[in-house]
Amino acid sequence: MRTRLLLLLLCPIGPLGTTRYELLGGRFSFDAPSDWRQDRRVDRDSTSFVVFEVPPPRSDTSQFAPNVVVEVERRLQHWDLKTYSNAKLAPPAGGTTENPIIRLDDRFSKRDHSRTVLSRGRLHGLAYAVWDKFTVRDSICVHLSSVMPAVYRRDSIWYARFSAQLDSLTLSSHVGANHVFSRRTPPTH
């Protein structure tokens, strides 16, 4: 019994709770892990986003934190999923081709009317994994994005926890009272 208590006290366990976020005046909501640090938040009538800095693995010495971005836009005109996601995935005008983003996987889901894209890129000599998930619901365009140094996948415990947290955030997303993404098929990344 004493050994278990000692192990529980010595084991570094991060916060397991979540924090509820509401954007676009409460039209869109989601739950983010409590240990993700909110880096930036902009909440306006037609465009809102939150940028989170995810705690990196303890073994990391690079000082490059993974980021998760939740972005929602309210559109008065009808946007379909393909048009919206293609616009978001397009390289910026006048952008450089020095560090191109390479698309590895691109899937449309009929079940929850979503698109998931897995890409990779390189910045400052460091390889990154990029995961994007899109949907359009009730004139609200949703874009979830994760950018992390690819080397973090080597830490299987950290990566499993991060993946579970990202899946939880994705499945907690609501437009009004309706779930945005299907509970039957969790996102792959």
Image: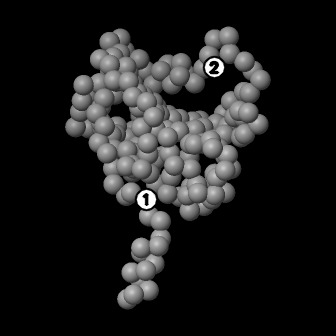
The residue tagged 1 is 14
Q: Secondary structure at mark 1?
A: loop
Relative side of 90 to 101, left or right: left
Relative side of 31 to 157, left or right: left
Which one is in front in this view, the residue at disc 2 or the one at disc 1? 1
Residue under the image location 66 percent in, 40 percent down? 128
Where 5 sits versus 14, above or below? Answer: below
Q: Nearer the viewer, residue 116 or 54?
A: 54
Q: Which mark is residue 84?
A: none
Whether residues under marks 2 and 1 lie with C-beta atoms below 8 angstroms apart, the answer is no
Q: Position of residue 166 (x, y in %)?
A: 46, 47
Where 158 sits versus 148, above or below? Answer: below
Q: Residue furthest bottom?
A: 1
Q: Position of residue 129 (x, y in %)?
A: 63, 41
Q: Tell me if mark 2 has few (under 14), some (14-19) or many (20+) residues whose alpha carbon lies within 10 angstroms of its own.
A: few
The residue tagged 2 is 91
Q: Nearer the viewer, residue 115 or 45?
A: 45
Q: Quadrant of the N terminus?
A: bottom left
Mark 2 or mark 1, which has the lower sequence index?
Answer: 1
Q: Position of residue 85 (x, y in %)?
A: 51, 25
